[in-house]
Amino acid sequence: MKINKSRFPNLMLSAILLLTIGIIAYNYTIYWSNTYAQSTIDEKDNFPENHPNLPANPNLKFPAENNHCLYCHQGIAPTRPFNSGMMRQILEKGSELGDLNGCVVCHGGNPAEKKDKNLAHSGAPAGGLLKEFTPVPAALQINENTCGQCHEDHSYNVHRSIMNTDAGKMKAITWSFGIGTENKDHIYGDHDMDDPDGDVPRFGSDRYKAYMKDMAVAFPGQYPRKLKQIPEVDLSKLESMPEQAAFTYLRNCNACHLSNKGMQDRGHYRGMGCAACHSIYSNEGYYEGADPSINKNRPGHVLVHAMQGTRKSAYTLNGKELSGIQVSTCAACHSAGRRIGHAYQGLMALGNSNNRGPYNEYGLPQNTNAGYVFKHIRNDAHHRLEKDGKQVPGLLCQDCHTTNSMHGNGNIGSTTLATVEVECADCHGTPGKYPWELPLGYGDEFGKDLTDLPARGLAGEPMQVTQKFGITYPKEDGYLITARGNAFGNVVRKGNKVIVHSDGGRDFEAPTLKEIAKTDAWKNKEKAVTAMINVPGHLRNLECYACHSTWAPQYYGYKYVIDYTKQSIDWLASPEQWGKDGTTADYHENFVMQPGAATYGDYSHVRWENPPLGINGEGRVSPLTGVIQTVSTVIGQDGKTIIWNHTYRTGEGHNAMELAPVNPHTTSLAARECAHCHGNSTAMGYGMDGGSYDAVPREAKYADIVDKDGHNVSAYTKAQIQGIKGLHGDFMQLLDAHGNQLQTVDSHWPASMPLTQKQRDVLSRSGT
């Protein structure tokens, strides 16, 4: 065989090239084989019993370190642990799009560009769903092309969830301004919204879907098929319709819905859309990861580029491991209104003034968190738990609130009562029945008779969506089922014990009342047996938290000034101005402004102890709290006052301010004392001491020199406290001495009302 020497160099080069390609391919295969081999769990795998967490393996690296996007962002954390199914899918998709590190799957951009940041952050690889680079891949404006690639149902659902519609807030505040008080239908939202796929939820068991379909038939006003965006104010009609100030207020106060970035200050830092919950922001808002391109000295950044969901996405930072959606993340939005996000942590929001102690070592006051300063009262019993003889962080919000509550179920969400599917008895049962022995709907009756319904039993597997994207814990004797028919993915029966697997990283045993009764393990037997066994009407008619919420944040008498000589941010229009990259006007702080601004907002008094009681939409006795009890002053564009300290009324003649039924999320092991309700006029709805305080709020109060007849002497005398002409009396007073209703109980549900005369007679010990 003769060799053509003139072609030999070319053959040698070809051989070397082929050998090099082979070595690279072999090493690449070995690398990913090792990576996959180290994975002990897939998104669809069962959660291994001996492996309670799955932290990122520090020995694993991006396939192309220092290359593509990592040329500038070297050191950035992976979105999820390398050995998770989600990250593997991202890397596979990225490889198909020419980016071995997978960044372009969520962000788009030009991974081949290394010199010009603007070029690198532009466009998107062909073949992907994105057409432009985005710094906010989870934003609802574009999330169908990012998160929706793998989570299509979640993407659809979250647009219609209560966290994006705010329909309940819309109803409460428009009602308090006298708008729509003819019924409790929910017609307004943050954005125009419909539900084209019909009224069957996308997530859930057949029993759950049937349950929710029946609820929508029974309460069409609470399960709307569409919502209209809250209108803008019509200034030409403001003088004749000053109640439009509600629209101005709502468009300015709704900075927390998922379509926008929201306020960017201490405690408010968060992402957009899905990232509002799944990205981690500290209260201070500083980046603490290893990406050198991100400024570590400027607030407003994600804590680390790693998404949180369940234990599978556990992450170690500063030598500490964290997992799950943090309570502080939820509190970034759930700090206003009923203040549940902070109340769960034992924090009572006092106001937005900085002039409160205890002072720090520099003599400075407490920093605001999400706009408030606090007094610590007492943690919710679920927030701090005893484990192995010491107090440890307890349950995260997501441990109780299911995916249907958080992401929505695909139908339009209006209120928490319409959406939340869990009841206390779902884990704790009653003294006579374990949770699995209760019928569906227990604690969630809405007037239904459950007498002949069978026991709900246990489920053999979690919801499909939990199996696909969450963790499948060992089922032991079966998964517990919620009041509305879905299997919990993280709560199981083991013998007669209930085990709760928290995504915070620990497992807890939830005490069941039947087991306590069987073993006579009561903490306070006399009190517990009297309340729950000897008086069965308590369990039949009361929410558990009516007794076990021994304190609740209560904010009474909210007084607004809406001044149309000024402007304010329109937090609803701002996110509707968005570009191809998904960023919105508010993201760039280039806000859409609107006429009118809430220049003052003041509560007459703030309380925390022993809230009054009423009946909620489910028909059960619940704590009531003041939230938005509107007293409005409206100043026109010309600076003239249109209405002054005005209260609106409903068609029935009630003040259109509400005492709202609420689970304050301040549960304590010890219940309220009997005397806190029995014989207590405040608990019955008659106000503090029967309404004797501030009994005539319609009259102005003076504190100046007077003559013997009580007349003001000085020609310059001014009222110290202005009168509120339409106010019935104490803001806490729901009923007058004759039992006539004075203000609204709940603007959302038809069954909500004051305690009945019979119930009040029992509490007042009538005839004894």
Image (cartoon, rainbow, N blue to C red):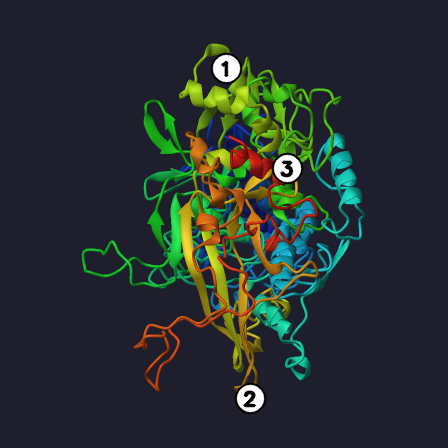
> In the image, what residue occupies the spot 29% across and 63% down?
355
> In the image, what residue occupies the spot 63% across and 34% down?
466
Pick the residue in front: 573 or 211: 211
Dot 3 or dot 1, earlier in sequence: 3
> In the image, what residue occupies the spot 69% across and 20% down?
455
Is residue 578 shown above or below 470? below
Is residue 601 shown above or below 623? below
Tell me the SS state at disc 2. Answer: loop
Cα–Cα span, label 3 and label 2: 49 Å
Q: Amino acid at mark 2?
A: Asp
Q: Is residue 672 visible?
A: no
Q: Quadrant of residue 617?
A: top right
Mark 1 surroundings: few (<14), some (14-19) or many (≥20) residues within 10 A:
some
Q: Quadrant of the N terminus?
A: top right
Identify the residue under disc 3.
421
Identify the residue under disc 2.
638
Cα–Cα span, label 2 and label 1: 69 Å
Percent of width and height locating residue 70: 46, 55
Residue sticking out furthest to the bottom: 638
Percent of width and height locating residue 715: 35, 87
Is residue 665 shown above or below 232? above
Dot 3 or dot 2, earlier in sequence: 3
Identify the residue under disc 1.
517
